[in-house]
Structures are given as C-alpha cells and as structure tokens.
Image: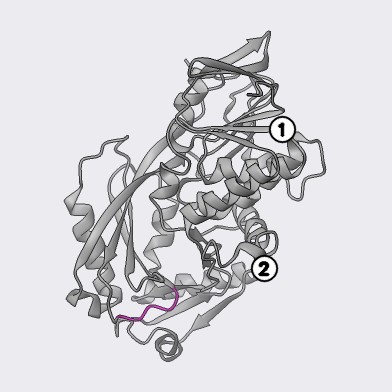
C-alpha cells in the first residue's frame, strides 16, 4: 500500500468528502481517513439543507450562494442520485412584528442577489394549502434546495476514488509527524503516512483533533439538534417551510434549548420536523422536552400533523463556531495543517464551496471567492497564536 500522499484528509463526512472530490480531480494524490465509517457521524444525522434564506448578508451568504451554484452546475449529472430537489423555502410569519421584520429583510436580501418574493396570505395558501390559518404572510426563497446527505457523501467519495483517492475507514489518527513547525506525516492506527498537507475535517470533533495534531486551539463545540420523522401521511408540504423565529435561533449563541418549527416532506411520503439547538456536549440523553416542543411547533404550522404518529427521531452534533462562521484555512501555528469545520447546521449546503475553495487554495490557484473571513487566524489575539493544549 502507498504510504506517501500529497494530501491527507482526516474525516470522511460531507466536508472531507467534498475536499477529497475536488482535490483528487485537481490531480492530487489524496488519502481520506476516518475513525469510523464514512459519513457515519454528523453527515448521517441531518436533513440535507441547501439554504440561502437563513444567511445574513456577508461572507457566509456569499459562500452559500457560491456553493449552491456548484451543486447546480458541477453536480448536475448526479442530481437524481443525490436526490437534489430545488424545492424552495418559505418563511412564515404569524404575528405583525415578525411580518414587518420580514418585509424589511426582503429589501436587503434582494439587493444581495437573493431570489425572494413576499407572499400574501392568499398566495401562501396557493403554494402550501395545508398551512395554518394564522399565517399573515410569508417569504418565498426560490433558491433553497435539499439533497440526501448520505447519498451525496457516497457519490463524492466514489468519484474521488475514481480520480485516484484512497479511503481508509476505522483508522484513528493519533497525531501528526512534524519537522520543526512543518507537517511531514500522519500517525494513525499502527501506521504512518507521509504527507506535507493535512485537512482536519472532523466536524464537532475538530477541536480535539487539532489538539492531538498540536495545532491551534479552535473554538468549535458540539451543538445537538433533533429531527422527528412522521409516518407516511396526507399532509401536503411542497417546500421547506419554517417560521421567522428559526432565523433568530440560527444566529444565537445561547447554550440553552431553543426550538423553532421547520417542516418538509421526504420522497418516502414522511414529514421531517425540526429544529432544536442546545449545547450539551456529546450527551446522548434524550431531551423529551425538545421533542415535545418540536412536535407542537410543527402542528402550529401545519395543524393536520396533529393526527400523525411519529415513527422515529434522531439527533446529531453540529460543529458550532463561536462567531457562527465556518473555519476554513491554514493553521497559523503549523505549516501544512488546514482546518475545514465550524459550519454548524449549514455544512451540507456549504460543503461544495468549502471543498472547491480548499482545492484552489492548496494548489495555489486563483480563488473563486475569498477565504479571508473564514481563516483560523481570526481567533489569534494580537501577535500570539493560541495553541491546543
């Protein structure tokens, strides 16, 4: 087996898979390592959202719009395989103050290239006939889309392997081999791989991985979220539908439990219900209050769901960054180490842009958009680098 690679990616979730896809297509010899099974952690415990509607103007919105362009263009031939659905998103308002805030937001969003339409109550019910009668209006974001995360991870890794990449599962990275302040290899389970470039794409585990790699201390922590899945039902949901409160919860740093209704259908005929956020580390204890609130919130948007049973629920740990921006770029303390994490609940949608930009950056090509706002260096205070202990 080859032991020398141009790039070693640690983490085979959707971020690592996207980096592998673009870097292998660029001609790099790529090795992907995962402590478990590919896509078996965060990527397998989410809904698969590709959203621009929940992004504030700024670098994350730019990355989201860029990524959406890639999903539509670079992956058009795989659209059916990954269940890509450009279904659009609808943000619903049920009180006057949130309706006025939504109207103000739309003006700014249009100025930044969003395809968004203000919906009257009548127009809203044409698009979503089963929506609550309490809705005063809504905003339709035509660019919002959805895909199947696990199918997408499988496609990205398959195509990366087709371009020469190697995937090793059940392989735990212990540390990096370093010469001076430069990466020269990766020490994994009973073996060492030689490389001058490593990407830490371990999602909510990235802070611990950086510590093991002797990189900087990166402020990423797990933030737990649940998804409920109903039985097959007759409730019609044609878009991704959520309340205006969801936009507030996306940007909060509060550690306590927050819930806001997010409802969408699946191709299997079930309804997926979100969302919740809470900072509890990697605690797996079921929070029944979170599940209760989520069900109640969904019924408030679509009253007919009250008659439906819940088949199952699942939770995942999102990589939360303290300033709500992804962390993408080189570690300032160790030459050759890169980080790609901190996307929180937007990782599925932002993975395409993250992968392509990292590929462009490490091959010294021109960048389609700047990575400066996402650089790990933003967490460096003064001239000192904060290292992982």
Q: Residues within 10 Å of mark 2 (few under 14, many from 20)?
A: few
Q: Position of residue 126 (x, y in %)?
A: 43, 90
Viewer-proximal residue among 40 and 316: 40
Residue 73 seen in the figure:
yes
Q: Quadrant of the N terminus?
A: top right
Q: Position of residue 209 (x, y in %)?
A: 49, 25
Q: Is residue 310 left or right of residue 28?
A: left
- Residue at the spot x=41%, y=41% of the render? 41
Seen as rendered, the residue at the extreme top is 180
Magenta stretch: includes residue 236: yes
- 44 lies above or below 309: above
Q: What residue do we see at 73% from left, 49% from top? A: 369
* Residue 384 visible here: no
Say which residue appears at 46% left-offset and 89% top-offset.
123
The percent coordinates of residue 174 (x first, y second) are 49, 18
Which residue corresponds to mark 1? 29
Q: Provide residue 77's location: percent of width, then percent of height.
A: 66, 64
Q: Give the quarter of the image for residue 250.
A: bottom left
Left or right of residue 223: residue 169: right
Q: What whole-number distance in Å separates the C-alpha atoms at marks 2 and 1?
A: 37 Å
Residue 310, image quadrant: bottom left
Q: Is residue 266 left or right of residue 54?
A: left
- In the displayed structure, 375 sits above or below 195; it is below
Q: Which residues are magenta?
A: 235-239
In magenta segment, residue 296: no
Q: Secondary structure at mark 1?
A: loop
Front of the two marks 2 and 1:
1
Q: Which mark is residue 113?
A: 2
Assess disc 1: are there few (<14), some (14-19) or many (≥20) residues with their C-alpha within 10 Å of its C-alpha. Answer: some
- Rendered image quadrant of residue 129: bottom left
């Amino acid at each position: 087996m080859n032991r020398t690679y141009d790039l070693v990616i640690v983490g085979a979730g959707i971020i690592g898979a996207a980096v592998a896809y673009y870097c292998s297509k660029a001609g790099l010899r790529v090795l992907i390592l995962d402590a478990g099974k590919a896509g078996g952690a965060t990527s397998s415990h989410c809904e698969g959202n590709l959203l621009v509607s929940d992004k504030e103007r700024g670098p994350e919105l730019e990355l989201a719009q860029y990524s959406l362009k890639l999903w539509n263009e670079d992956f058009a031939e795989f659209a059916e395989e990954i269940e890509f659905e450009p279904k659009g998103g609808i943000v619903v308002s049920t009180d006057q103050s949130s309706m006025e805030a939504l109207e103000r937001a739309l003006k700014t969003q249009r100025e930044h290239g969003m395809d968004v339409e203000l919906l009257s109550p009548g127009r809203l019910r044409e698009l979503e006939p089963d929506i609550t009668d309490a809705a005063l209006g809504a905003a339709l974001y035509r660019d919002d889309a959805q895909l199947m995360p696990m199918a997408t991870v499988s496609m990205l890794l398959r195509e990366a392997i087709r371009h020469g990449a190697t995937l090793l599962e059940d392989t735990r990275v212990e540390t990096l081999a370093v010469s001076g302040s430069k990466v020269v290899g990766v020490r994994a389970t009973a073996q060492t791989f030689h490389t001058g470039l490593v990407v830490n794409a371990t999602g909510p585990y990235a802070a611990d991985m950086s510590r093991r790699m002797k990189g900087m201390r990166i402020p990423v922590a797990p933030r737990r979220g649940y998804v409920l899945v109903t039985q097959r039902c007759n409730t019609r949901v044609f878009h991704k539908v959520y309340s205006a409160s969801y936009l507030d919860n996306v940007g909060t740093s509060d550690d306590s439990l927050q819930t806001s209704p997010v409802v969408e259908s699946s191709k299997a005929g079930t309804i997926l219900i979100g969302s919740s956020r809470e900072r509890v580390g990697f605690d797996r204890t079921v929070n029944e209050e979170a599940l209760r609130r989520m069900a109640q919130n969904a019924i408030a948007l679509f009253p007919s769901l009250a008659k439906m049973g819940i088949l199952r629920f699942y939770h995942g740990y999102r990589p939360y960054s303290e300033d709500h921006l992804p962390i993408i770029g080189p570690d300032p303390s160790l030459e050759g180490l890169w980080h790609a994490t901190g996307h929180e609940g937007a990782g599925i949608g932002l993975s395409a842009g993250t992968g392509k930009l990292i590929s462009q950056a490490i091959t010294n090509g021109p960048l389609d958009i700047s990575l400066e706002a996402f650089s790990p260096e933003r967490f460096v205070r003064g001239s000192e680098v904060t290292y992982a202990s």
